[in-house]
Amino acid sequence: MTLDKKITLCENLTPVEVRIGNYIMNHKETILNCTIQDLEKEVFVSKSAIHRFCKKIGLNGFNDLKIELAKEEKMEEENWVDANVPFYEKDHAKEIANKLMDLYKSTIQDTYKCLDAKRIDEIAKIVNSAIYVDIYAVGHNENIAQNFKQKMLNIGKIVNCPSAYYEQSLITLASNSDHVAIVLSYSGAMWSNQLRSQFLKKNVPVILITRAGVKEESVDNVYHLFISDSENLQNRISQFSSHIAMQYIMDVLYGAIYNLNRTKNNQYIRKSMSYHGLNQ
């Protein structure tokens, strides 16, 4: 997650800390070459206020903030790729390949910074113990849902991936606390009021996977996982970044579920391969 995102997503900043954050976002080159005393005088705040601000956005202090800025500047100079238009008409296949490689790397790194490991472990236990696992997705996210379904089938866990809106509605109506709903929605638009009210009313645990920046609700049984938000919702030629970020987070979730019963899952996979005569 970039420094700008850390600042804008931090919801408990005081007015003084908001002023510090705005100055930093608008004067990055100045910050790289100044001391904490310089910033103190420029923004008319105390050193302690600057340190509190740094702590709130997840950094140890002002020096860490400068290091973070320097890293971001270096990345932009070396391999920054526009997530919305990662290649151009003049680019040949090798140039396209290199740019997409850089985009995928930066997307996964950005998504990794958004990860809450404790929350993923908690979600893995919820999904693993649920009798019914239902994934709600549309468009290219349906492919990711199907991929997750196949992985879970390999360890003996059945997952539903209703594709048509009508089927999704029927499964929503039939859901109860034996179900867990995984909602894949980069924009957050799938988390509609109708879907939300049904799940909350029926006490269905919901895993909402969406881009960083979508406001997190403080509601029981709703668990948020965030992915890189570098892709624009409209001005893009395809979902390169959001697709790889969503695939990555679902693979991480599968890995956490797999490790809950690793020995049992290893045995099940060997048994299923033998049953089907597969060895791949």
Image: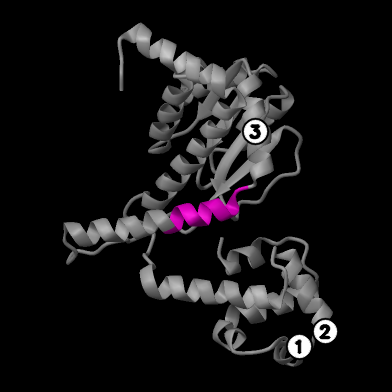
- The tag earlier along the polypeptide, 3 or 2, is 2
Real-space CA distance between mark 3 and mark 2, rounded to the nearest whole angstrom: 41 Å
**Residue 252 at x, y = what percent?**
52, 39
**Horizontally, is 231 left or right of 20 in the view?**
left
- The tag earlier along the polypeptide, 1 or 2, is 1
The correct choice, above or below, for 114 with respect to 254 in the image is below
**Residue 263 at x, y = what percent?**
55, 20
Real-space CA distance between mark 1 and mark 3, rounded to the nearest whole angstrom: 42 Å
Residue 198 occupies which quadrant of the picture?
top right
Name the element at disc 1: helix
What residue is pinned by disc 2?
46
Name the element at disc 2: loop
What residue is pinned by disc 3?
123
**Residue 32 at x, y = what percent?**
58, 84
Mark 3 neighbour density, 10 Å: few (under 14) some (14–19) many (20 or more): many
Residue occupying image coordinates x 58% and y 33%: 256
What residue is pinned by disc 1?
40
